[in-house]
Image (cartoon, grey):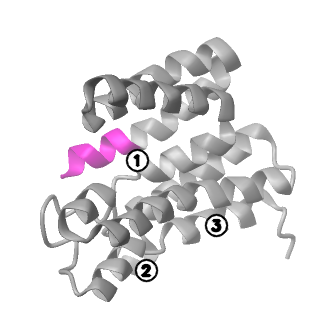
Amino acid sequence: MNLGHPIVVTVLAYLIGSVPLANFVARRSGAPDLREVGDKNPGFWNAKAHLNGGSSTVVFVGDVLKGAIPVIVALAVGLEWWQSYLVGLAAMVGHAWPLFARFRGGKGVLTWVGAQTMLAPLPASIAIAALGSMWLVRRNFVMAVRVAVIAFPFIQIALEGPWRTAMSGLMMTLIGLRFLQR
């Protein structure tokens, strides 16, 4: 088996995305199943509402790493740029429809962030800087996140052109579909 083969890396990405980290952390914390409380999303925002700060931070970091690690592997084995984007998308699909959690997963926002920080580091860094600036000025994290997410494709198209931006948009579309399902 060639670990550098695009299909192998893509399947690995789906499996990494499928790890139900938020469910595991909630169980270890003695909290209810995050798929049954709050917004019923096993992701950071719901974890933040129902778990202590340390546990929700683990979920935050873990969900970001679900997107970052598979893309790092894809880049390390020399996949084409567009194949690396598909690997990131596979991690998001795994997070949204996890094999290890009866296909009941999260929306994939932080998994997308993790993938994008590896796929488009300069646009992602600028968007994160915009997020930080907006948060410092307004002290409203939700608004700051929205500014960064809306700004990202404009930053990316200016720096990287339409093809990579289109692939990022495809990944963002999955998030939109997940928000429609709940």
Farthest-out residue, front = 136
Relative to residue 62, is residue 131 depicted above or below?
Answer: above
Amino acid type of the residue tagged 3 in the rendering: Val
Residue labelled with disc 2? 100
Magenta-drawn stretch, dominant element (helix, strand or loop): helix
Which quadrant would the N terminus be assigned to in this image? Answer: bottom right
- 28 vs 115, nearest the viewer: 28
At horizontal 66% and vertical 59% (from top left) the residue drawn is 70
At horizontal 22% and vertical 43% (from top left) the residue drawn is 180
The part of the chain drawn in magenta is 175-182
Residue labelled with disc 1? 109
At horizontal 27% and vertical 65% (from top left) the residue drawn is 47
Amino acid type of the residue tagged 2 in the rendering: Phe
Rounded to the nearest angstrom, the CA distance separating label 3 from label 2 is: 14 Å
Residue labelled with disc 3? 11
Rounded to the nearest angstrom, the CA distance separating label 1 from label 3 is: 20 Å
Q: Does residue 65 appear to the left or right of 8 in the view shown?
A: left
Mark in the foreground, 1 or 2: 1
Q: Earlier in the sequence, mark 3 or mark 2?
A: 3
Where is residue 100 drawn, in percent x and y?
43, 80
Instruction: Say whether residue 178 is magenta.
Output: yes
Q: What element carries label 2?
A: helix
Image quarter for residue 9? bottom right
